[in-house]
Image (cartoon, rainbow, N blue to C red):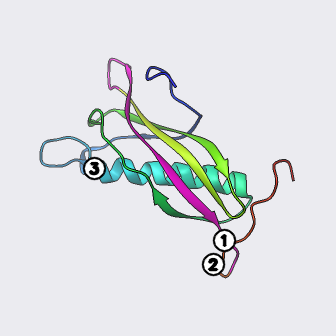
Amino acid sequence: MSEDQPRGNLTVRISAMPADTNANGDIFGGWVLSRMDQAGGIAGVERAKGRVVTIALDGMTFIRPVRVGDVLEVYTNVDSIGRTSMTIHVEAWARRFETYRHEKVTDANFTFVAIDQNGKPRPIPKEGA
């Protein structure tokens, strides 16, 4: 996919605030990762029609920093579905403060498992079911 266009659906949008920065004034990578996990979980719940948990993510490389005032936009795309698990591609993009330039920050593939009320894996319904 092109690096100038997000892949997937806009799932989370949030402003980066001063309380979320490291000593250099950049937004913590963990804050970005948390928003990505949240967005992946939202997409997972919608597709699995119920509770999901994160079980893994592949490596992440931060391409650019997120700064105070930027709007973090997180996009999700369900890439594959197994019996109880799914892989969701998650991309984080920064809409730069004042310039409104849109830049990719990082991406990763998250694996989620659908669970029942007892926390046990459950089958993911077929599409349209």
Please tell me in which quadrant of the rendered image residue 9 appears. top right
Residue 120 lies left or right of residue 76; in this view the side is right
Residue 112, given in percent of the width and then of the height, sits at: 58, 60
**Is 7 drawn above or below residue 51 in the view shown?**
above
Q: Which residue is labeled 3 in the image?
A: 20
Decide: few, some or many residues near mark 2? Use Cα within 10 Å; few <14, some 14-19, many ≥20: few
Residue 28, given in percent of the width and then of the height, sits at: 26, 49
Q: Are marks 2 and 3 in contact (CB under 8 Å)?
A: no
Residue depicted at x 71% and y 52%: 47
Q: Are marks 1 and 3 in contact (CB under 8 Å)?
A: no
**Is 69 drawn above or below residue 125 in the view shown?**
above
Q: Earlier in the sequence, mark 2 or mark 3?
A: 3
Residue 117 lies left or right of residue 77; in this view the side is right
Residue depicted at x 27% and y 49%: 20
Q: Which residue is labeled 1 in the image?
A: 115
Q: Which mark is residue 119?
A: 2
Residue 102, given in percent of the width and then of the height, sits at: 40, 23
Between the residue at mark 1 and the residue at mark 3, the CA separation in whole angstroms equals 31 Å
Decide: few, some or many residues near mark 3? Use Cα within 10 Å; few <14, some 14-19, many ≥20: some
**Is 70 drawn above or below residue 99 in the view shown?**
below
- Outermost residue on the left side: it is 23
Residue 58 lies left or right of residue 39; in this view the side is left
Q: Amino acid at mark 3?
A: Asp
Q: Are marks 2 and 1 in contact (CB under 8 Å)?
A: yes
Q: Amino acid at mark 1?
A: Ile
Q: Is residue 105 magenta?
A: yes
Which element carries disc 1, helix, strand or loop? loop
Q: What range of the chain is rendered magenta?
A: 96-117
Foreground tag (1 vs 3)? 1
Q: Is residue 89 magenta?
A: no
Q: Amino acid at mark 2?
A: Gly
Between the residue at mark 2 and the residue at mark 3, the CA separation in whole angstroms equals 31 Å
